[in-house]
Amino acid sequence: MLKTKSQLIIRSILNSYSQIFFSDGKLLGITLLLVSFFNFNAGVSGIIAILASHTSAFLLGLNKAKIINGLYGFNSLLVGLGLGLYYQFSFEFVLLIIFSSVLTLFITVVIEAFLAKYTLPFLSLPFLLGIWIVSLAARHYTSLEISELGVYSYNDLVLLGGNDLLQTHLSIKSINLPASLQMYLISLGAIFFQYNIYAGIIIAIALIINSRISFVLSLLGFYSAYYYYLIIGANLGDMNYGYIGFNFILTAIAIGGYFIIPSWYSFLITVLLIPILSIIVSGTSEIFGIYQLSTYSLAFNIAVLSLLLVLKYRVRNFRKPELVSIQQFSPEKNLYSNINFYSRFGNNSPVAIGLPFFGQWTINQGHNGGITHKDDWRYAWDFVIKEDEKEFENKGDYLADYYCYNKPIIAPAAGEVIDIIDGIADNEIGDVDVVNNWGNSIIIKHGEQIFSQISHIKPGSFQVHKGQWLRKGELIALVGNSGRSPFPHIHFQMQETAFVGSKTMKYSLGPYIENAAKKFNFNSAGIPKLDSMVENIKKDDTLKKAFKFIPGQKIQWESTEDSNTKFTEEQLKWTVEVDFNNQTYIHSPSTNSYAFFTTTDNELFFSSYKGSKSDPLYFFYLTSFRVIFGYYKGLEINDTLPISEISFIRILQDFVAPFVVFIKPKYNMKYVNNKQYINESEVVVKSNFSRTIFGKNSNNIPATFRIVSNKHIEWTIDINGKTHIFTRKL
């Protein structure tokens, strides 16, 4: 337990450093910590500030995950670094650091609470308020002494490393680096109050290792400002004054790849934002100069928060650029997860909308239909039930003859009932009601500007009421024949407004199963076409029990005698947990690895992995990336994984990822057998992970899952030519 607590404390300290660059990278955190000790007073002050802030946050009962992630520490760290650079170390100064850090924590929580209303980050606003207040107050503290470190830089070098270090410095200084590059490196170091080129070089190297996109953006931000200053005729010395050039670097990283998905659009908007940022830098510097205060990162905060708020007020062009929905503290991860999401679930389906019925139905009028689905109402479907190519039994003269008449209609997704029209009588077969075109209908709101309309419902059959919140699959009403409907069917459409008869919008449905000539196809998201036989996934209890994971669940695998595995017993013990963002994940404590996933009533799908690539959990993630809880013989699921492997080719990919992706990890699962015996059953599915680079296939990892009678599951996997066999009880 003591070891675990120590690890969490160390992790929270390192995260406080890396959070300044919007990251949770350990190596970056360690590097930045070491760089802060280029000025010993500043380095020690930073550590004291973090410990004071985190201890206070813990004692006050603030969110532990946020403490560990460094979100409540990095602003106090900046205050500690800034004060440590200016004052000499003493007992009085330590007291000032401690209470200044607690004050900054209070300011952090207050600003967080205010900005949370607008779902905006607090950035380094708490640092700004903290350092300004303390700097003004400290002018009245006579016990504090101004530090002489940094005044005579050559003397400092001799004290730090003797004459050899001084001579090394002079040799490096004699190298004729371009002035702009020197300004860039010094601006990079200034983020940590280190106003020297060496800090900048080390931080640049750490930034490349941690995030190639962030490094490219840091160059883009700085050099956009540099050349803008040249074009506009501004004094380049302004970028050196107070070392405010780091505002352009941080803004570029934040806008280009952290809060916005990296893309052509994010890079372009970063370049266009730089002139505005320079105006804010110059204007605020004039104002704060009156009070002899530095603006520090004020311009960065104003520019980033303003842009993010503007983007949140958009009513169109939501992907130009697109805001990050789930933050993964890495531009690469944000980008790859985003690409992966749209390749899996469709480009225009922010909410998963299923089919509004049970069982298998046929589409007898689809988009751009030949009868009524035209013009503004062309994106709609009519569903019927067919048996032996017929929609009815007997002669089809009566409503009751039709297979779909009186069948249940269910909610296609969770949402609120906005409107219900009822009381319109069903038509006799062949008749239509041209006055009440839509007949009895319901409108359900599933999200902002995302509504579904279901029409031609049987009068008096509604099981819900206006204003009611529906769960997906909940019974709504029964199929009827009201309105402009000569024969019973379900009319279903998606629309942007909340009125019956609104013009339709093109929207992918899913997930669903299509039965095409007795061959089953899985559609994660798609537009069902005319004459397609479609159904929602019909659950198989065996598959659901084997693959539906619930927070709090303990997972224990055991190696069989036939296995060649060298995995330890501890590596095969996992837990299912949920984080403060309500993301569920499987955790392998032995290597501290995480596989993030989502489960619905119909399927399991993983989204990302973090941790050791040699842990069994990683191979489970690769080979069970997506599993539907329904058995359809011969069905194949094809999916794409986010790019995650660390290799030289991946590093090259990162540099160009916002513009082109040439690494494509692929996943396939095939449903092989579902045998039923007298006393037991057996379900067998096979999967395979592969990767293509420039279109060439490599790195196959095949696996087989055999589930026996809801008693146990056997997982066989081939890794680098070695067969590993594991079992676990269900």
Image (cartoon, rainbow, N blue to C red):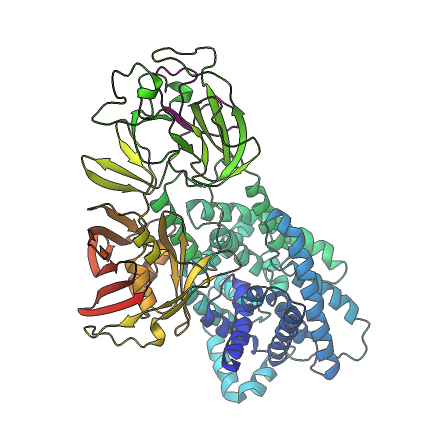
Residue 227: within the magenta?
no
Query: What quarter of the picture does the C terminus occupy?
Result: bottom left
**Occupied quadrant, residue 191:** bottom right
Q: Is residue 687 visible?
A: no
Residue 113, position as x, y percentages in the image: 66, 54
Q: Residue at x 47, y 21 (%)?
A: 459
**Residue 2 in the figure: left or right of residue 642:** right
Residue 628, position as x, y percentages in the image: 31, 49
- Of 243 and 58, nearer the camera is 58
Q: Residue at x 27, y 53 (%)?
A: 666
**Residue 118 in the figure: left or right of residue 699:** right
Residue 325, position as x, y percentages in the image: 49, 49
Q: How many marks?
A: 0
**Occupied quadrant, residue 296:** bottom right
Give, as a single range, the part of the protein colored magenta.
479-506
- Of 317 and 656, nearer the camera is 317
- Of 651 and 566, nearer the camera is 566
Q: Residue at x 77, y 66 (%)?
A: 136
**Occupied quadrant, residue 453:** top left
Residue 485: within the magenta?
yes
Q: Is residue 518 above or below residue 178?
A: above
Dominant SS of magenta comes to: loop
Residue 33, position as x, y percentages in the image: 53, 75
**Residue 526 in the figure: left or right of residue 482:** left
Q: Is residue 122 visible?
A: yes
Q: Is residue 339 above or below residue 446?
A: below
